[in-house]
Amino acid sequence: MTAATHWNLPVCERLGIALPIVGAPMGGCAGPELVAAVSEAGGLGLLGHANMPLDEMREQIRAVKARTSRPFGVGLLFPSGTKATPKGGEPPALPSFLAPFTRDFPAEGGPKARRYDNELAAERLEVAIAEKVPVLSFGLGAPPSAIARAKGAGMTIIALVGSRRAAIEVAARGADILVAQGHESGGHTGRTATLVLVPQVVDAVKLPVLAAGGISDGRGLAAALMLGASGVLIGTRLLATPEARTADTHKHAIVEMEDDNTIVSRCYTGKPSRVIRNAFTDAWKGHDAEILPMPSQWEMIEPLVEPAKRAGSLAIANWPTGQGAVLIEAVTPAGEVVRSIAADAARLLGSASGYLQ
Ligand SMILES: Cc1cc2nc3c(=O)[nH]c(=O)nc-3n(C[C@H](O)[C@H](O)[C@H](O)COP(=O)(O)O)c2cc1C
């Protein structure tokens, strides 16, 4: 197999891409530089617009279009089971056991803009439609009304699922492609490991399935295809690229990680999310009962965590990162990452017949 390998997979055909690799819509990290680099390399880049103001989102979409004429998409979060935040309401106060953390990063006061409810996500969807973005990805939940609106506007729908039940539900609502996202994943994640979840979802639906969670190299892509997936969605691997909008301390922590130093915690957002373990996640031990539901937890800790994140603090800030970090050895340009994953997988798949005599 050569670099000119033609990938004959439903997902490539459906998305109009040459390589079966989709860049995860990582909120705050997958900006125009990363998305355009992934799409230019032959994959599909997805902008992470989880909680972005509408003007910024519009600018980012236009910035991608200025960089590439290839297909790309946006990722939105419509979290299921969340209560809308009262408009103009103050965020809840930080619990007292977090006081030591506010010494280095005094919590920023003042009313916060509402950023996390489904009403705002629906407004973001209207921006994506107005900007004629071809692909929409849903994380955390995919409400029927939002799917219908996006499909009616001609968008291709990708939806992340963490269980067989969710896969069947979202497929019935009209999703075009499912992402079977396993427990290894960075960010919000379910309980089932990728190796078990992918074949389960593949068997349950008649749609192309992308495998996600712990895929950092060509071995991961080759394995995912053997599980019945039609391609992969990768997040953590793309964080360790010059194009990713995350702190250098975060990129460094990923490259340096030799044994798994991630933890699944609800302490940042109110829903289980895999992040780098740090003093802040440790401080929540024994305080599970004080964790608020999404989006209140997010809003409560944000005045402390956002400034810490801007300063690159590994001790306090929220650094969503998957277990696949241990496989990443260098910060590498995103285009190179995508091309080498595809080329390595092609080589492995080509030599697999040697296992049989
Ligand atoms: C830093 C980071 C931010 C993420 N933000 C989002 C998001 O805003 N929306 C979403 O649907 N998924 C988000 N995810 C999850 C990814 O879409 C994807 O499922 C996951 O990264 C795949 O696992 P991997 O990190 O092991 O490659 C995020 C993941 C990371 C690592």
Image (cartoon, rainbow, N blue to C red):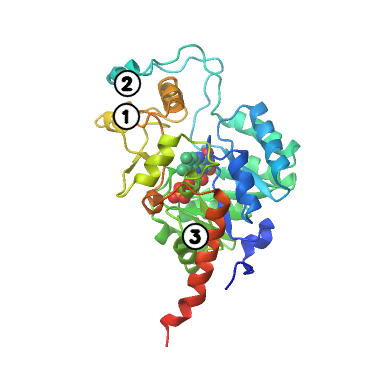
Amino acid on which the number 3 mark rests in the picture: Val
Q: Quadrant of residue 124?
A: top right
Where does label 1 land, which residue? 280
Could you tell me residue 268's position as x and y percent? 40, 31
- Left or right of residue 227: residue 41: right
- Left or right of residue 348: residue 284: left
Q: How many marks?
A: 3
Judging from the image, what secondary structure is the residue with disc 3 in?
A: helix
- Left or right of residue 179: residue 284: left
Can residue 320 be seen at all in this image of the molecule? no
N-term-proximal mark, 1 vs 2:
2
Judging from the image, what secondary structure is the residue with disc 1 in?
A: helix
Amino acid on which the number 1 mark rests in the picture: Phe
Q: Nearer the viewer, residue 121 or 105?
A: 105
Q: Are marks 3 and 2 in contact (CB under 8 Å)?
A: no
- Distance from disc 3 to disc 2, alpha carbons, whole Å, reads 42 Å
